[in-house]
Amino acid sequence: MLEALKERVNADAGLVRRGRMLTTTFLLQSGDTSWLISIFEGRIASVTRGPFVMPSSSFALRAGEAEWQKFFLAKPPPGSNDLMALVRRKVLKAEGDLQVFMAHLRYFKEALAKLRPVGGAA
Amino acid sequence: MSARFEPIVGRYMHLDLFGRPHRLYVEEAGEGTPLLCLHTAGSDGRQYRALMNDARITARHRVIAFDMPWHGKSSPPAGWHEEEYQLTSAQYLAMILAVMSALELEKPIVMGCSIGGRIALHLALEHPERFRAIIGLQAGAHVDPYYDLNFLHRPDVHGGEVCGAIVSGLVGPDAPEKERWETLWHYMQGGPGVFKGDLYFYKIDGDIRSRVGQIDTRRCPLFLLSGEYDYSCTPEETMAVAKSIPGSEVAIMKGLGHFPMSENPESFLKYLLPVLDRIAG
């Protein structure tokens, strides 16, 4: 699901520029599956699929598989169109050092929206 | 390309509020029935720019929007640098009534969005006789905090960036890019802690759930319009308010989000113009 993230984010010069102060590794969990996503100065350095023995990350975003599937639709329905919409419905848990997440919130929203079919809105 | 001026006129008004002198920025356009417009939390009166530029509105209405203290081109009161800004229901009500008196607005229509929609419910409950009609956009009786509001005002998170990013998903998916990003820019321009201070009213002090059923629409007509994609004040929450107020009229606006008048004016007007026609009788 997340493997396309590296190519799509790194191809967007504006997004990479906005993330130039961002270097971190975060964990995204969908149901029982997790990925570690490493970012170096706005570019996605690696996307690694679990399982992991002892994953280290600055923060984690955890939601059920069905919720992510709706989020990644080209035009998600109301309530699934934004990370904060998922947070509002309490189906997305954001855990860990959320300063990193919130300080770069636009970046994370736009990066994950890259996984929508081409033409989908951020 | 030659220069073109909009019909909007802006002025600065000096007014005592809560026992302190304030300098407020007030914009208006059009002639006719006064239509007093209240902006959302953390933004300013520019949200109503399209309405003030639309002859379908301004031919029959004097459209007025003021920037609340601390917002837009209105200053915070002297001494602000030692204070934490927090908007309360009492202050918000007093401010609106004071501005109406200062501008000598006789029975205006009041239309507010988000926090403005919430205070519209307070006005409908406490001062219905002052208004010709009340229009609540994205109006709910209460919203519980769903994220840590402290992130909106701390030195290691850029306030403008985070305020814009927090609300970006509240813009509906069909919004034109130009209007979407104009709407977000207003959020990015807010002063430190101002959006958070407004949310004190929205999420804590302004809870009107226990009293909203007492609103009497025979004393003042109440219209509720909410965007389908708003997850701050959801359509379900607006419908619940409407259900508890006999005589209120409600519509859920397809494709729109939390900032209908600013994010997608053309779509919004399809819902607003019939309401204004109804009010005009």
Image (cartoon, rainbow, N blue to C red):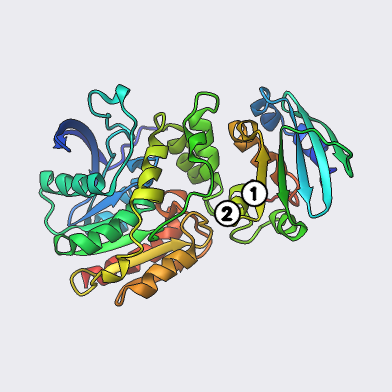
The amino acid type found where label 1 is placed reads Ala
Q: Which residue is mark 2?
A: B173
Q: Which residue is mark 1?
A: A121
- Which residue is rendered at x = 50% and y = 58% of the image? B256
Image quadrant for the C terminus of chain A? top right
Residue B93 or residue A81, whichever sits in front? B93
From the viewer's perspective, tell me whether residue B14 is left or right of residue A88: left
Task: Confirm whether residue B218 shows in the render.
Answer: yes
Q: Residues within 10 Å of mark 2 (few under 14, many from 20)?
A: many
Judged from the image, the secondary structure of the residue bearing numbered disc 2 is: loop
Residue B11: x %, y % from top left: 20, 34
CA gap, disc 1 to disc 2?
Answer: 7 Å
Which mark, by number, is residue B230?
Answer: none
Do the CB atoms of the residues marked 1 and 2 lie less than 8 Å apart? Answer: yes
Residue A93: x %, y % from top left: 66, 48
Task: Confirm whether residue B112 shows in the render.
Answer: no
Give the residue at the far bottom of this rendering: B246
Quarter assignment of residue B126:
bottom left
Quarter assignment of residue B197:
top left
- Which residue is rendered at x = 38% and y = 35% of the image? B194
Residue B78 or residue B44, whichever sits in front? B78
From the viewer's perspective, tell me whether residue B281 is left or right of residue B242: left
From the viewer's perspective, tell me whether residue B132 is left or right of residue B148: left
Residue B94: x %, y % from top left: 19, 47
Judge if badges 1 and 2 mark residues of a common chain: no
Residue B100: x %, y % from top left: 15, 49
